[in-house]
Image (cartoon, rainbow, N blue to C red):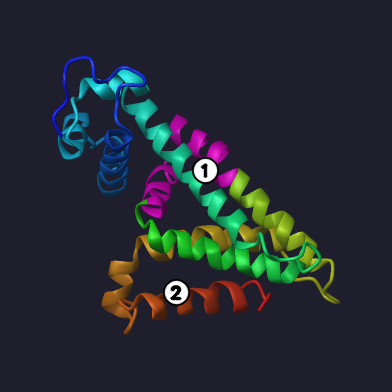
Amino acid sequence: MARSKGAGRTGDQPSEGFAALEKAAGSHFAARGYEATALRQIASDAGVDVALISYHFGGKLGLWKAIVARAASDLHAALTSAVAHIDASETAVRLRATMVAYIGYLLDHPEVPRLILRDSTVASDRSDWLLRELSAPLHQRFYELAQAAAQKLAAPPPFLQFRVANFIYAAASSVARRDRLSRLVADMDDSEQFAAALETLLIDEALRCG
């Protein structure tokens, strides 16, 4: 996608240029990690001038943060939409619907769990930022839903907060490593079977909210 001089100015850049840039950046960061990702390769794949990245995002870190922020925003929007039609009093139903939507989002955007796992397992400023901007708000959202559902149970499950955290990371890890799991477990290359397995093991059994 050719760019004319000055096309990187705010308001001049077509939205599809940014979409291509974010898609390319997300794929590279997820596959290679932050340190090994070259901005020139991202720009080349997106069909934009590499200078556009510095102009609009301030460099690699700014672009990485924009990718994570967009993922967090899109994810929370998907989770909100999943329960928009469910009455607030149906706490268990809302919890399960949100969990199913989370798994569905990860399956539709496998670069997101890969990105989360790559940058959350090594202590760095990026992992702290990722925890603050994506992981912590996501955990809080699920924990509040789980608490509301647990209040209606005769015997609330123990270690509820840990169960929530384990669900979030277990789902992300499973989706990120799906290719390897498919080599070990039959039918995991089938998306419906894979999703059903995740829902059964991570929702119905692990959190006991089925």
Q: Can you see residue 69?
A: yes
Q: State the residue in front, 203 or 16.
A: 16
62 relative to 95, above or below: above
Magenta segment main secondary structure = helix
* Residue occupying the far bottom of the picture: 186
Mark 1, secondary structure of its residue = helix
Q: Residue at x 32, y 39 (%)?
A: 19
Q: Position of residue 47 (x, y in %)?
A: 17, 35
Please give the label number shown on residue 73. Answer: 1
Mark 2, secondary structure of its residue = helix
Left-right relation of 60 to 154: left
Q: Residue at x 17, y 30 (%)?
A: 40
Q: Which picture quadrant has residue 58?
A: top left
Q: Residues in magenta? A: 112-136
Q: State the residue in front, 8 or 152.
A: 8
Residue on which disc 2 sits: 195
State yes or no: residue 122 in magenta.
yes
State yes or no: residue 157 in magenta.
no
Q: Position of residue 48 (x, y in %)?
A: 19, 30
Q: Position of residue 15 (x, y in %)?
A: 33, 34
32 relative to 197, above or below: above
Q: Residue at x 69, y 56 (%)?
A: 143
* For marks 1 and 2 on the same chain, the one whose residue lies earlier in the sequence: 1
Residue type marked 2:
Ala
Q: Crowding at label 1, few (<14), some or many (≥20) Cα neighbours within 10 Å?
A: few
